[in-house]
Image: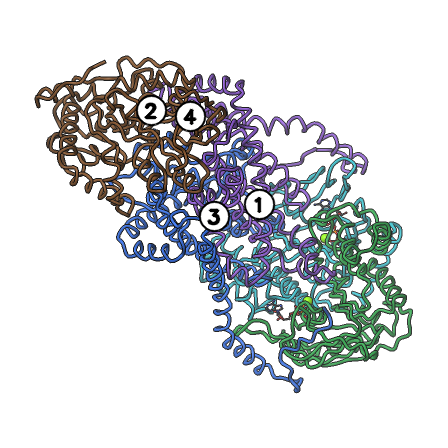
Chain colours: A cyan, B blue, C brown, D purple, E green
């Protein structure tokens, strides 16, 4: 079910992709979504993935999460827990309340009820949905659903976190607040994060490293460290400068490919 | 479409406070509860009245002799006698008990079979298509086997009921599992649900609507198989609805036959109400209630 | 499992099948009035089972779920021939007569039947054979598929009442109580089958036991046959009480007592005799072969009437002929 | 879970060209086509062999007399005779034609009824629960009415078949319509689909999987009702599977009964294959194929 | 089915909301999503709605589209065509190919086949998905699905367009391109647009007017004209200035409400 190898020895790499290729479909319909992607993520590193629409970012996260098999290449994870993935869509369970959705991973880990309750309440507070625990997903707005999905993923407590545009449906203010929260949690739990976003400034705000993917086939074409000291502010000039550079690169790339 | 005015509460003061609005919502509901009950009842009454009227008119035309097609009057009179007789209640007690036990067994078999076939490639290839084939086998074909295996006991009846209903239930489960949204399966797996837990936390609840639909179809199969199976043997002179139905026909007792049909319909309505309540509860949760019909 | 219980003595269960029907009157009366129980004695437990039709009863005998059953001539022959003469034995008769051709009022003789539809209970059964054979004698042809001068429509007796009432058929060759019911529905009896048989006797119900049970418990079978003889005595000597017993028994199963009038109406057409009338069974089979419905069947060994004759002898009654 | 190595093609050159990858995908498929056919066939053969072996072993133990439970040998021999006789093919032709016509009528009635009830509040309140109740009514209860209405014609058979199958199909439709995602309904309406168009472009396709499931259940009801209904009218010069089944039982002919059961199972398998193909086509379109089973 | 009044006379208002209130649920569970919202949109005007997550933006669009009834107040539309709505989720029909999805509104309008084909091809080119016509929604990436939904909405050819975060799942470059496309179509077709976005700069780039909604209950708390002459660039200083002002307002608002 998973496409990953665990090598507890290599403590220097939390996630390692070597020549990962992914082909969807067969024959003439085949789409080469990823083509020889090699990427090492160090433990505790925060890596942001940016790239044009349809370039293979979600595909990559799915592969790392072990939900799909690569067509070629090798994915290695340190430790034995599989990474937590926050999908691009909320993917909430429609038959459960917001609380129960967030509680599911805790239940699956076998946490006692009292602890679960406490944890759920805390997580809902983190995403500013404390009053909405009893609602069902269809009663929430788009951004609220996304925040529930965030809470559910955070409930997983895995050392590696994969996030696919987690703040895409949020207004700037809520987003700001959640940036801070995520950074806090990342520091506290010493997480390794692989984060997909279209907002280059968000990437510059959060990342240790920004990786740029090209479209069809998806290849890593650029990678840069963000050396701005933390805490950073989204509208800080250093952050803006990094964003501008990445945007330039992206623009050339998208421009080259046309669409 | 865009040309009708629908301003439910034409309020001149555009600025209404939050509390106000909540109260309005509450009051709206209060007012409509009775109306809604009535909205659910009058069509039933109207349908009933229409059916009875039509029936009576046909009888009045003298189209058929009264022993072939009795009118509502005599049938309802016989129904009255029937309802006040021990025969109905004894028969219903026996039949209902058999139906519940047989259906429960069929549910157990059907659910297990369905889940197993739905998620195992080999099993599906081996016996998947056999399920529908079994479903089409008429009950009487199983009678000899039932007697062989269980002699003239109630188990023989249960056997026929289970063979009738379990395939239907299994098919419901398979359908439900087949259409679980892949995204939710992935989400479940990523949240740590594997094996049994994936069933328990994702597949089963996601497939629940289809499973309930399958159970409903299965109930119909179970009940029909039971009506046939109760003819297999009358154990210890115990009367049953199935036996009464057939004997009413054997004795050309059209009034009693129709009275029994009405009883069967009423039982069906009660069971449907239970399934309907379950289904509405699910739909309310899922947020798909109140789209068109109720 | 009564059939497997030890020798002639010790506790034995006898599972006896019958139909809650007027042609099974001795069985109904024997069970309801405790005649079997008395004759069988305290060491034999009687377990009566009622059936709706012959096939299920034969299936039950074949699977060892039933030790003995009252049944019509057709299932008797089928059970015997399908088991290559092994599974069953007829140990007594029970009833004769009670079959007639009922037709629409306008039909007064065989020639009127040309182009008409006649119902029978089942393709190839006694009544089906009888009507075809009779028509043949009258110079009218029939075919298994419903062709010929007269169309034969095999269908359930219950349905025959419905189709006769709705005019879809013109007549029916059926047993009681359907004869009476069709007559009450406006039909008239064109042929009483008794008129076609020597002495007006032909088998309609006999008592069948499984060969295994017979071998294991000959003593129980003897007592069962004694019970049958006693039941017939009761039926013949106290018809009113018997008729009431039948109505009550049917009522218990169907939830509505059968109209006593109907039983009384049908009663005179039946004769409750212990003679299984083997000649009529044999003749019926010959007729079936003649009209092309079946292949010849060897009935040797079907009848074991020694117990019956023993019982009759003991009562000083005339014995029956063992074929 | 995370400790197994699954690098499908352990390629040392990490940089593989797009064309390469496509070719690999193509070749993989070629290689597996035969394997996939075999993967779909061997479980069936194994299941068949297992069933036959079990049956034979039970017969060999002498558990029951051969006339009560014949072995596979005599049954298959009789099946051979049956298959080469005109009786089977004539009967099958008649029954299949009736099944197709009756089912088609049931589909028409069931679809219309289902759509009407699913989308009309009043109709649903009036007769919605009646559908399940009707479904539980055994076929024999309808026989008198069928004869009253249609005498001894084939229509009487169709009447019973339609009454047996249409409620099941209608229930499938209602279930499907009830669970159409509200978002898609809104999208459809906003795109200009109203009334019939909303059905045609949104509701019907969205409910299609459930409708197909309902049709499958309906087929089973239709076939079983047909087997019973074919006894209703034995029409001149026309034999049928239902009649043959009952005759085999009437004549205590266990071998022929089992031969006919095998024929019924084979027909069921063929029909299931058709439904299975339809369902797989839908699932492929919707992208929910190949989640677990096939 | 719709909650709108048509007054062909009032050519000065394409869309008019007067004291519109929307309550979800009943009794103690009731949520007041919109509270007395009054808003007039002139024909040809491009109005952007911004507001915190869950403040009632989607609710408002649904009401204007006639897909829901207001609990109070009145909504008036000019002309007799109901507005086209691009939902927050793609809401594509999973049983249709991309082409067929885009073709649906054209079919429903009864366009002949040849014209439909041409139109679909043109629209797919507009959203840069010309090669993906034969795919099914589940074979697309998140951003691609959003673009298909955009094409489908544009196929509607209605004078009023309601768009709920239409570019939320797109990378900056694709978004830029689609801004230009949308502006072009808006000018050509003289559309009236009501546009929800979380990206204030996007609002400043596109809008004639920006309207700010408060959260629970949703009320209009601020409205400003954007007088920057077109064509505008996303990174133009005037656009940035407008964005900064709106952001300030938004920040105060969200800050005031807590979440
Ligand atoms: N299940 C699938 N079947 C076929 N093709 C797929 C499938 N999933 C993704 N693809 C294709 O793979 C490519 C990459 O898709 P992916 O979802 O990884 O893109 P993405 O980078 O996440 O884009 P976005 O930013 O729009 O979400 C796309 O061309 C898409 O069409
Ligand atoms: N169907 C519903 N049932 C109950 N409550 C609902 C429903 N739809 C929306 N709401 C509530 O109404 C409020 C406004 O929701 P809406 O979807 O309009 O927000 P929004 O402004 O679009 O937010 P976002 O930017 O997150 O999409 C929210 O509090 C939400 O919980
Ligand atoms: Mg993506
Ligand atoms: Mg929204």
Tag 2 residue = C74
Identify the chain of the residue marked 1, using the numbered disc in the image: A
Give the answer, above or below, for where E182 lies relative to A15: below
Q: Secondary structure at mark 4?
A: helix
Is A227 positioned to the left or the right of C261 in the image?
A: right
Tag 4 residue = D248
Q: Secondary structure at mark 1?
A: loop
Q: Is residue B178 visible?
A: no
Give the answer, above or below, for where E245 lies relative to D220: below
**Quadrant of the rendered image containing residue C180:** top left
- Badge 1, how many Cα within 10 Å: few under 14, some, many 20+? some
Marks 3/2: CA distance? 35 Å
Q: Which mark is residue D135?
A: 3
Q: Give the residue drawn at x 72%, y 78%.
A: E17
Please state the horizontal and vertical placement of residue D128, each as a whole percent of the image: 51, 57
Q: Give the residue drawn at x 57%, y 61%.
A: B293
Tag 1 residue = A80
Q: Give the residue drawn at x 65%, y 43%.
A: D282
Looking at the image, do the residues carrying marks 4 and 2 touch, with CB atoms under 8 Å apart? no
What is the count of numbered marks? 4
Marks 3/1: CA distance? 54 Å
């Amino acid at each position: 079910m998973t496409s990953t190898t665990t090598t507890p020895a290599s403590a220097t790499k939390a996630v390692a992709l070597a020549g990962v290729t992914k082909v969807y479909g067969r024959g003439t319909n085949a789409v080469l979504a990823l083509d020889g992607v090699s990427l090492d993520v160090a433990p505790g590193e925060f890596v942001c993935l940016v790239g044009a629409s349809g370039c293979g970012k979600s595909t990559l996260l799915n592969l790392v999460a072990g939900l799909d098999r690569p067509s070629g290449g090798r994915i290695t994870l340190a430790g034995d827990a599989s990474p937590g993935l926050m999908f691009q869509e909320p993917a909430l369970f429609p038959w459960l309340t917001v609380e129960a959705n967030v509680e599911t991973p805790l239940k699956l880990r076998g946490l006692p009820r009292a602890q679960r309750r406490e944890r759920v309440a805390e997580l809902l507070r983190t995403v500013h949905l404390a009053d909405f625990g009893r609602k069902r997903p269809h009663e929430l707005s788009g951004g609220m659903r996304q925040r529930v999905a965030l809470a559910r993923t955070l409930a997983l407590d895995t050392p590696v976190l994969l996030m696919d545009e987690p703040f895409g449906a949020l207004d700037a203010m809520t987003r700001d607040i959640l940036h801070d929260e995520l950074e806090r949690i990342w520091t506290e739990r010493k997480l390794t994060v692989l984060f997909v976003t279209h907002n280059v400034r968000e990437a510059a705000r959060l990342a240790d490293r920004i990786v740029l993917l090209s479209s069809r086939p998806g290849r890593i074409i650029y990678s840069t460290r963000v050396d701005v000291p933390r805490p950073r502010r989204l509208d800080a000039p250093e952050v803006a400068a990094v964003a501008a550079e990445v945007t330039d690169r992206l623009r050339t790339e998208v421009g080259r490919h046309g669409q | 479409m865009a040309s009708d005015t629908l301003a439910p509460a034409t309020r001149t003061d555009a600025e209404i406070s939050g509390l106000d609005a909540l109260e309005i919502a509450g009051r709206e509901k209060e007012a409509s509860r009775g109306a809604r009950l009535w909205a659910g009842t009058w069509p039933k009454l109207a349908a009933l009245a229409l059916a009875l009227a039509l029936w009576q008119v046909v009888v009045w035309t003298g189209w058929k002799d009264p022993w072939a097609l009795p009118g509502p009057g005599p049938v309802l009179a016989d129904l009255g006698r029937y309802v006040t007789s021990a025969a109905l209640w004894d028969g219903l007690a026996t039949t209902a008990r058999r139906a519940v036990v047989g259906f429960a067994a069929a549910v157990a078999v059907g659910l297990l079979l369905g889940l197993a076939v739905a998620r195992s490639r080999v099993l599906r290839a081996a016996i998947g298509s056999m399920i529908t084939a079994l479903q089409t086998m008429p009950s009487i074909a199983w009678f000899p086997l039932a007697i062989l295996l269980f002699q003239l006991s109630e188990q023989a009846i249960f056997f026929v009921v289970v063979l009738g209903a379990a395939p239907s239930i299994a098919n419901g489960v398979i359908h439900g599992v087949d259409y679980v949204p892949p995204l939710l399966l992935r989400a479940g797996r990523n949240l740590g649900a594997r094996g049994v837990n994936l069933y328990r936390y994702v597949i089963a609840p996601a497939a629940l609507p289809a499973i309930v639909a399958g159970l409903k179809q299965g109930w119909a199969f179970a009940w029909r198989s039971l009506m046939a199976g109760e003819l297999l043997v009358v154990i210890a002179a115990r009367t049953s609805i199935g036996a009464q139905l057939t004997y009413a026909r054997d004795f050309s007792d059209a009034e009693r036959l129709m009275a029994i049909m009405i009883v069967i319909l009423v039982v069906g309505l009660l069971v449907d109400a239970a399934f309907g309540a379950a289904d509405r509860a699910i739909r309310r949760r899922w947020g798909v209630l109140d789209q068109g019909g109720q | 499992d009564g059939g497997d219980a030890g020798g002639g003595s010790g506790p034995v269960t006898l599972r006896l099948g019958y139909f809650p029907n007027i042609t099974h009157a001795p069985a109904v009366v024997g069970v309801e009035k405790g005649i079997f129980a008395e004759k069988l004695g305290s060491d034999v437990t009687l377990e009566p089972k009622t059936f709706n039709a012959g096939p299920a009863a034969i299936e039950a005998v074949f699977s060892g779920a039933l030790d003995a059953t009252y049944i019509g001539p057709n299932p008797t022959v089928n059970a015997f021939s399908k088991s290559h003469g092994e599974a069953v034995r007829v140990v007594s008769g029970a009833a004769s007569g009670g079959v007639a051709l009922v037709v629409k009022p306008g039909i007064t003789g065989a020639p009127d039947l040309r182009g008409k539809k006649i119902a029978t209970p089942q393709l190839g059964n006694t009544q089906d054979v009888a009507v075809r054979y009779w028509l043949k004698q009258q110079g009218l042809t029939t075919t298994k598929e419903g062709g010929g001068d007269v169309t034969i429509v095999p269908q359930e007796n219950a349905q025959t009442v419905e189709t006769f009432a709705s005019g879809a058929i013109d007549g029916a060759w059926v047993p009681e109580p359907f004869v009476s019911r069709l007559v009450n529905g406006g039909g008239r009896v064109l042929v009483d089958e008794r008129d076609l048989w020597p002495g007006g006797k032909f088998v309609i119900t006999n008592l069948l036991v499984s060969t295994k049970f017979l071998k294991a418990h000959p003593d129980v079978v003897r007592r069962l046959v004694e019970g049958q003889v006693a039941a017939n005595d009761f039926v013949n000597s106290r018809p009113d009480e018997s008729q009431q017993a039948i109505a009550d028994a049917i009522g218990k199963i169907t939830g509505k007592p059968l109209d006593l009038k109907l039983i009384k109406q049908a009663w005179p057409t039946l004769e409750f005799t212990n003679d299984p009338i083997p000649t009529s069974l044999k003749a019926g089979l010959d007729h079936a072969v003649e009209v092309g419905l079946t292949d010849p069947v060897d009935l040797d060994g079907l009848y074991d009437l020694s117990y019956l004759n023993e019982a009759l002898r003991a009562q000083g009654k005339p014995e029956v002929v063992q074929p």
